[in-house]
């Protein structure tokens, strides 16, 4: 074991130099939330002189342990610091705005005699996340084969404007099945809401699985579909069409209150509707 002490120092990894291990900056930040930026560094055998933070090459935060006070702040649009949660290894940004987006750089330097300096950068985009999943309207919970399914889906306000998509049993709906509506812009700020419609004839193959269900999903996504919000409804199969079912429900609800003549007229109307539905399906 004695021969190890004779080896030159270059046989061992050097860990004495100043280095930044990582800069912890979220890629996306919610406009409604605070965000913590971290700078994980190792000064080796050196003595820390300062830690500085920059946004787009403009300094806004400086930590020098030998100074009093140890923290200095420089005004920058879009930057508001929560100083109660700032130190030499992390800073907290509050009251985010769209101007808070940018490239953030952590710069660490040591005191003499070496006076080393290292830095590392990362990009952050501030978005307005939707307050909830999309809202589906006009779609019923039960359909029969041959019925026309029609409805709309609207996203919550967000920035940037979302991409809206429908999925039928996990498969993206075709352009012929969807209808895009104009984007709604919130006058209070650059926030967007978007709606998309869906319309197609229900086929037998749409009902899948042992329970014969149709899964209909509306999706709102931001930043090239990297962030997604979804709303799904499960549709059951009807043995009669929607029109026939309405006749049956009305008949069952009123069978005890109608007179014989009206009873007969209701049955005749139901028979005519059912016969017409059969002819349509056969053709």
Image (cartoon, rainbow, N blue to C red):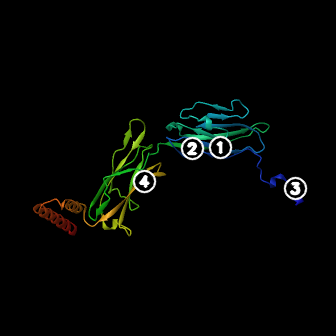
Label 1 crowd (10 A; few <14 / some 14-19 / many >=20):
many
Q: Which mark sits nearer the N-terminus, 4 or 2?
A: 2
Figure quadrant of the C terminus: bottom left
Label 4 crowd (10 A; few <14 / some 14-19 / many >=20):
some
Q: Is residue 172 left or right of residue 5?
A: left
Q: Nearer the viewer, mark 4 or mark 1?
A: 4
Q: CA distance from mark 3 to mark 2?
A: 45 Å
For label 1, the SS is strand
Mark drawn on residue 19: none
The residue wearing badge 3 is 5
Residue at the image point whose x is 42% and y is 53% from the top: 230
Instruction: Give how far across and how far down residue 212 sits, in percent.
Output: 35, 67
Question: In the figure, 271 relative to 155: above or below?
Answer: below
Q: Which mark sits nearer the N-terminus, 1 or 3?
A: 3
Instruction: Give how far across and how far down residue 16 sits, in percent.
Output: 77, 47
Q: Kindly check if marks 1 and 3 are in contact, taking CB atoms under 8 A apart as contact.
A: no
Q: Kindly check if marks 4 and 2 are in contact, taking CB atoms under 8 A apart as contact.
A: no
The residue wearing badge 4 is 230
Q: Which mark sits nearer the N-terminus, 3 or 2?
A: 3
Give 251 or 158, whichever is nearer the viewer.
Answer: 251
Mark drawn on residue 39: 1
The residue wearing badge 2 is 123
Residue at the image point whose x is 53% and y is 35% from the top: 78
Label 2 crowd (10 A; few <14 / some 14-19 / many >=20):
some
Q: Which mark sits nearer the N-terminus, 4 or 1?
A: 1
Q: Nearer the viewer, mark 1 or mark 2?
A: 1
In which quarter of the view is residue 213 placed? bottom left
For label 3, the SS is helix
Q: Kindly check if marks 3 and 2 are in contact, taking CB atoms under 8 A apart as contact.
A: no
Instruction: Give how far across and how far down residue 117 sits, in percent.
Output: 71, 40
Q: Which mark sits nearer the N-terminus, 1 or 2?
A: 1
């Amino acid at each position: 074991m004695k021969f190890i002490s004779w080896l030159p120092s270059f046989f061992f990894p050097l860990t004495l130099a100043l280095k930044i291990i990582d800069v912890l900056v979220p890629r996306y930040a919610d406009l409604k939330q605070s965000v913590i930026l971290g700078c994980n560094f190792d000064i080796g055998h050196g003595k820390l002189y300062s830690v500085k933070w920059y946004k787009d090459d403009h300094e806004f935060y400086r930590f020098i342990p030998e100074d009093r006070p140890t923290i200095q702040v420089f005004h920058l649009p879009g930057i508001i610091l929560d100083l109660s949660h700032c130190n030499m290894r992390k800073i907290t940004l509050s009251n985010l705005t769209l101007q808070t987006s940018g490239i953030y750089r952590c710069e660490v330097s040591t005191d003499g005699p070496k006076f080393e300096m290292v830095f590392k950068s990362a990009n952050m985009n501030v978005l307005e996340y939707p307050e909830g999943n999309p809202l589906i309207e006009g779609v019923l919970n039960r359909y029969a084969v041959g019925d026309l399914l029609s409805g709309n889906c609207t996203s919550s306000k967000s920035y940037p404007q979302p991409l809206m998509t429908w999925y039928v049993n996990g498969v993206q709906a075709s352009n012929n099945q969807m209808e895009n509506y104009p984007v709604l812009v919130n006058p209070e700020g650059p926030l967007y809401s978007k709606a998309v419609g869906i319309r197609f004839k229900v086929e037998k193959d749409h009902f899948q699985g042992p329970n014969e269900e149709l899964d209909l999903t509306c999706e709102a996504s931001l930043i090239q579909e990297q962030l997604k919000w979804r709303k799904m409804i499960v549709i059951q199969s009807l043995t009669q069409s929607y029109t026939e079912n309405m006749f049956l429900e009305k008949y069952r609800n009123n069978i005890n209150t109608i007179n014989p003549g009206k009873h007969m007229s209701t049955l005749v109307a139901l028979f005519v509707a059912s016969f017409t539905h059969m002819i349509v399906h056969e053709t």
